[in-house]
Structures are given as structure tokens and as C-alpha cells.
Amino acid sequence: MDTLFRMTETAFRPALEKALQIALSYLNDLDRKPVSSPVDLATLRRRLAKGLGESSLPTEAVLDQLAKDVEGAIIGSAGGRFFGWVVGGSFPAALAADWLTSTWDQNAALYSCGPAAAVVEEVAGSWLKEILGLPSEASFAFVTGTQMSHFTCLAAARHALLDRRGWNVEEKGLFGAPPFRVLCNGERHGSIERAVRYLGIGQSQMLNLATDAMSRVIPGALEQALRDDPSSLTIVVLQAGDISTGAFDDFHQLIPLAKQHSAWVHVDGAFGLWAGASPQYRALVKGVEQADSWTTDGHKWLNVPYDCGYAFVSDAKAHRDSMSHRAVYLTHDDQARDQIDWNPEWSRRARGFPTYAALRQLGRQGIADLINRCCCHTKTLVSRLAALPGVELLSPPVLNQAMVRFLDRKLDSSDRDHDRKTDEVISAVAASGEAFFTPTTWHNKRAMRVSICNWRTSGEDIERTFNAFAHVLTQR
Ligand SMILES: *Cc1c(COP(=O)(O)O)cnc(C)c1O
């Protein structure tokens, strides 16, 4: 115990060196290990649910045993052949800065509690606005992910809309408040409704707008909904990158329409907002800067470790009024940026450091290259898959997402047979350990989602992945 708590180099060096050794061997072995997790739940529980000991263990033993017990159950999402959901990896500079974030262990709530953390966020926030093409005067917050970013942005929206009716929502809450509604893309991500729930608005205030075949809001449907109830306070939620098709709402047309009716426009751009960082794809987000709030993730396409999303709000006052708090025991700074004025958390991780490091490592061109490369790999993989017999392209890539399905090739096969076949092929490829994809149901059909947002994915990874499918498909 005495040695454990003695604050000397000897206490930290073995722990950090052990962690470095485990980390490097993990990262170096990614290409040789299965991408999926071959270990089953019972085994994993048996290995990890040890009795909690009375006495302390040496640091190295703790780390060694942990690494051994999780062996085969760490999914290979840090590597280049993981294409499930929408999951990025970590750039070396971002990963290393994340280690330093833990080392420095700042409480990034206030400038006074972590001056460097506050200024790093301030600088990284303005870089992000510039890279993504958002208004330079927008306020921002570094949050845990898009989920909390929706919460933060919609809290600002709730404040601003009710303030117009003279209702102070922070003071009075929503009991007896003027009604308002959320018009949204019917294909939206579930994190929108969770944010709506957290904010006490309630899911029944959400109205789905009709969408086209690619899941884009039909302008006439938005206009009709706005006209139908002109007196209601309204939030309109649009998408930069649909979770299935990757499609973008037509911001250029829809946002001015919503603004004519005094609605607040919020954009879910968890991955898609990054199109704005590439000259090649920037046209997809044309007009997006006219919205009132935007959300995107750092931990997906920017390849920063998990726990990193960004909220941006055009009405900085509404944002601040909805989040800020003053307490006598806190030291607020009137020159610096106190994160507690913009964030829902109190004590929080200094999550600006990894973002700052990733942006510095990449530079503007490096980010554009990352976006272009992932999109290019998506196109290559999907077009090669679609050329195989029995593969149907359901949704071609707009950006870095696409969907295919696998057809049961017996004569009188039905959609249900294709559904089964699609699930089987996805499982067989995962079981091969070569690549990892996730299924979904889209327009009543089982489909395989393809999502490429890891900086490590190489041409060779695409080749290996294609070969895994070719092999699985000839086997059945
Ligand atoms: C991932 C995702 C979210 C949720 O983001 P988290 O960072 O997981 O909270 C929301 N919308 C879209 C389109 C996404 O891809």
C-alpha cells in the first residue's frame, strides 16, 4: 500500500510502460487478429468477474490480467476493416493527446480550473467552425457525442423559441408553457428523440415530414407542415448524412423556407457535416450555414478517441442562457471562456486536447484527404461487391455510407429469403474475422450497411474485405 500511494516516478513508470507495451502490441497486431469478437459472453464474464480482493495488486499484474482477460473480446474497430454502424478509429496524435488528457487530469469546467484546457477548446472550436464552413460567430460546446450535442443545441432552441413568447423556460420549466413542436426528417437518428425526451418536450410533439426515396425531406411537405400550424413554435430537424443512405437534406431550399416561418433549424451532421471539409464534397452541405444549430462528432470521422462531439449554435446568447450557471464558490473569468457556460456537464474531461492534436496533425488538406479517401474506398468496395452475382446495390454511396443486400438465388425466392441470406452473409464474413459489417432493415428489406470512416482503412483492407465476401458467396 505504501508504495502504491507514494508519488514518485517509480509508481507511474511501470504502469505507463506496461500500458504502452500493451497498446503497441494491440495496434500492431490489428491486421493479424480477427475484427470480430470470437469470445462468448459466458467466457468473458467468467474471466472478468473475479472476486474483488481484500488486498491490493501490483499495477503491472492488474494491467497484464486485464489485457489477458479481454483478449479476443475487444472488437477491432480501431483497425481498417471495421465497417459497422458509423465508427471511426483514432489518429496517433489524437490517441496520444487523449493519454495526456488523462495524465493532466484537468477538470475542464472552468478556465480557472484548467487554463490550458479552456484555451485549447476555444482555439479548436474556432478551427472546427472554419473547417466545417459554419458561421464564425457561432458558439460551441465540446460534449460527449452527437447525442449530447443534440441535447445542448435543442436546449438553446427551446430557450430561444419560448423567450420569443416571453416565457423563461429555465425559470418556469415547461408546465403551462406555450406549445411547440419538432418537425423532423422521418428517417432521423434515434438520438434526436432521446434529446427531445430529455428536454421534457415529449415525443408526441414530433411530427415526421415526408421524405423521398433517399430519405430527404420533401420541400412541399415541410412547407405544408409549417403552413398548417403557423402559430406554433417550431424546431425543424434536418440531416447532413442520413444514417442509412448517407443522403443530405436540401439545406439551400429548406432552411430559408423554415426561416420564413420563424422556425429554429437544427442539423444532425454526426458524420455528414464533414463533407464541408472537402472541396470535392462541399456541395452536399450547400446552404447548411444558414441553420441555427449544428451537431457533429469528433469520435467518428475525425478519428479522435471516444467521448467527443461538438455542438454549434448561431444564437450564442440563447446557448449560454440555457446552460450557464453561477455559484459563489466558483471562480468565473470574464476574459476567458468558461466551458460551464456552454456545456451541460459540470466536472468534465478536457476533451479539447485530442481534437486539437488531430486538427494539428492533419491540417486542412489532411482532413480533406481523409474524407476523400474514405469516400473513394466506399465507392470501390460497393461497386466491386455489386458486380458479384447475387448482390444488389440498395443505396449507392453519396459520401461514405452505402447499403447492399444479398439475394437468395433459388428460383422462387421471396424478400424473406433475401433477408435471411443477407443476415447469413454478414454473419459469415464477421465469423471469418476478416471484416465487420452491421445489418439494418431499410424500406422493409434487410440490408448490409457500409460505413467507412477510419483513417487506417487502406486499399489493401478493401481488397481483403472484398475477397472475404467473394469467398463467403462462393461457399453458399
Ligand atoms: C452516430 C450518430 C448519432 C449519435 O451520435 P453519438 O456520437 O453516438 O451520440 C446521431 N446521428 C447520426 C446521423 C449518427 O450517425
Image (cartoon, rainbow, N blue to C red):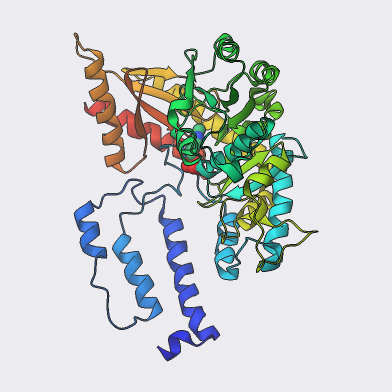
Determine the residue positioned at 56% across, 60% down.
349
- Of all residues, the one furthest to the front in this rendering is 176
Q: In the figure, is residue 224 to the left or right of 277?
A: left
Q: Does 254 sit above or below residue 264?
A: above
**Residue 107 occupies quadrant:** bottom right
Quadrant occupied by the N terminus: bottom left
Determine the residue positioned at 66% across, 21% down.
255
Residue 278 in view here: no
Counting from the top left corner in percent of width and height, residue 28 is at 45, 57
Q: Does 121 sit above or below residue 105?
A: above
- Of all residues, the one furthest to the bottom in this rendering is 2
Q: Does 48 sit above or below residue 404?
A: below
**Residue 311 occupies quadrant:** top right
**Front one among 47 and 203:** 203
Q: Does 103 sit above or below residue 346?
A: below
Counting from the top left corner in percent of width and height, residue 226 is at 59, 15
**Front one among 308 and 24:** 308
Q: In the figure, is residue 148 to the left or right of 49?
A: right
Counting from the top left corner in percent of width and height, residue 76 is at 39, 49
